[in-house]
Image (cartoon, helix red, strand yellow):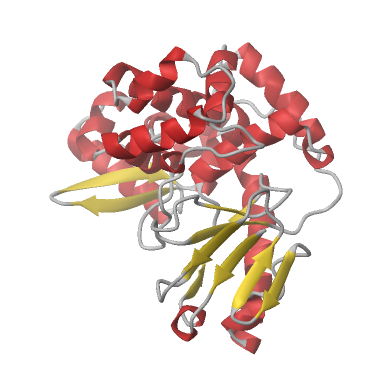
Amino acid sequence: MLRIHFTTEDLGRVRLAQQPDDLWETILSLHQLVEAAPFFAPWSRQARGALAAAGVVPDARMLATLAPPSSYFPDFLTPPVDLGRSTDLGTGIDRVLSTSKRRLRTDTNRLASDLPSPPSWLDDIASGRPSALRRLGTGLRRYHACAVAPHAAASATCVGHDWARLTRRALEHGAESVLTTLGPTFRWNPPVLETDYPVEQDLHLDGRGLMLVPSFFGIHRPVTLADGELPPVLISPVTRGPLWIPQTAPGPCDGMALDELLGPSRATVLRCLDVGQSTTTLAARSSISLSMASRHAAALRRAGLVATERMGSSVLHTRTALGTALVHGG
């Protein structure tokens, strides 16, 4: 059982994220591939085919070993969520790869203690070896592109409905009432929120508040970080029907449709933003001038397809969920 202990201050600091976190969705979707939940059965068959066709099965196996569905998986794979910053995949992976060696070692040692035969590459990650971390980052990107990104539109629609429901509840009855309507596994016994959980865990908020993040690919139970000293977050499954049948053959829109819609140069820019890019990097990858890259990024931002975040003296452009859905034909 998971018990989350609130103070009076914490009840006023409950926050609702409007969209799923890309890294949490990546890890939880892996769990659905392994556990084969009925709701995701059609998606699972489709995702397995896409992973095999793209040669990403070895990456998926590595990630499934690193994040097993039935036991602990490292907290560093899902860095703390912050409403004030982008939760796109590129930013998230940068945070993963910037994890301190102490955290890498602590988390992987805990994981290794649960594995009957830890693979040798796990120690490479624990030691922070650049080649191992690069492989991890590449694996996360490749898996996400094949199994998660093509379904961004369906995920956003489902999450949007749930977010609207909880937001109306908070506005009409207060934040505390949200805690009573999160799902059938939750029990609100003031000042403690309880839910079914595979291990006994107590999370004391101590005035830090709680970030509620919706999850499309999480289905069995809510999830939180194992280390209670990290910023408190609760990944909560959204309300859904009995079965999801995703669109058939959701492949990249690599024909003329996207070019005709946006123009070849602008379409290329949008495709290149599978991970966060500075304007300079974006120009180089798109083979266009710096000023043209800036103009295209601005136009895509006005259309809601790109988000731009200032990072010191430079900016970072990333695709939004809508932009990703457009690229993948969603």
Q: Looking at the image, which residue is at 39% across and 35% down? A: 275
Judge by depth and name the residue closer to the eye, 194 or 110.
110
Q: Count up the numbered dots.
A: 0
In the rendered image of this protein, does residue 173 appear above or below residue 183? below
Identify the residue at horizontal 69%, vertical 57% (top origin): 238
Closer-to-camera residue (207/37): 207
Vertical placement of residue 124 versus 102, above or below: above
> Which residue corresponds to the image point at 59% horizontal and 80% vertical from the top-left?
191
Report the side of 217 relative to 65 (left or right). right
Considering the image in quadrants, where does the C terminus appear?
Answer: top right
Q: Is residue 108 left or right of residue 195?
A: left
Percent position of residue 131, x then y:
31, 16
The picture quadrant where one finds residue 179 is: bottom right
Write down the quadrant of residue 76 in the picture.
top left
- The correct choice, above or below, for 197 with respect to 134 in the image is below
The x and y percentages for residue 115 are 57, 25
Q: Position of residue 41 (x, y in %)?
A: 81, 33
Residue 330 visible at all: no
Horizontal relation, residue 273 to residue 7: left or right: left
Residue drawn at point x = 44 percent, y = 13 percent: 120
Q: Residue furthest left?
A: 313
Residue 242 percent across, percent down from the top left: 86, 49
Q: Is residue 184 visible?
A: yes
- Quarter the N terminus occupies: bottom right
Residue lying farthest right? Answer: 242
Q: Quadrant of residue 29?
A: top right
